[in-house]
Image (spheres, helix red, strand yellow):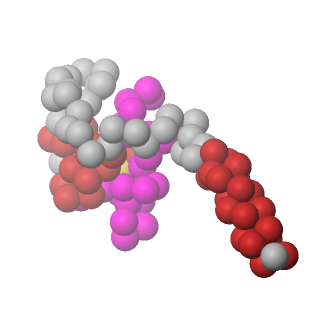
Amino acid sequence: MKKNISASALMALALLAAPAFAQDHAGHGSHTGHGTPAPAKKTNAAGNGNASFESLDKNRDGFVSKAELPERHPLLPHFGMGDKNGDGKLDRKEFASAMAML
């Protein structure tokens, strides 16, 4: 009988703990709706919003560094996650992947 009570108590505890594991990711909101495509975002060469890779690559070296991003670019808080090889800059593939996270 104790075995059933322990299993029931464990199940109840697991159900009560589930909301603690569903917290927001670093203040970026929940992950609800990640399976649906986001609406298309406009490109803006002035740096407000999602400018194209070419417009952000100021020194034309084929990479976008964090310093090349405008002050409030939405990619700034995600830059480290996009920089897969850790070289401090995003190539075209890393840039596209990072932009898809937004």
Observer-nearest of 11 and 25: 11
Picture coordinates of residue 62, whole percent (x, y):
18, 55
Q: Is residue 2 above or below residue 51?
A: below
Observer-nearest of 100 and 14: 14
Residue 26 in sight: no
Picture coordinates of residue 41, whole percent (x, y):
20, 27
40 horizontally vs 73: left or right: left
Q: Is residue 21 above or below residue 9?
A: above
Q: Is residue 58 above or below residue 91?
A: above
Picture coordinates of residue 6, whole percent (x, y):
79, 71
Q: Is residue 76 magenta?
A: yes
Residue plotted at (63% across, 45% down): 19
Residue plotted at (48% across, 38% down): 30
Name the quarter where the N terminus is drawn: bottom right
Residue plotted at (16% across, 29% down): 40
Start-end of magenta stretch: 68-91
Picture coordinates of residue 29, whole percent (x, y):
50, 35
63 horizontally vs 29: left or right: left
Name the quarter where the C terminus is drawn: top left
Q: Is residue 99 magenta?
A: no
Task: Name the quadrant containing residue 61.
Answer: bottom left
11 horizontally vs 42: left or right: right
Residue 81 in sight: yes
Residue plotted at (27% across, 45% down): 35
Q: As drawn, which residue projects farthest toward the front?
A: 1
How many discs appear?
Answer: 0
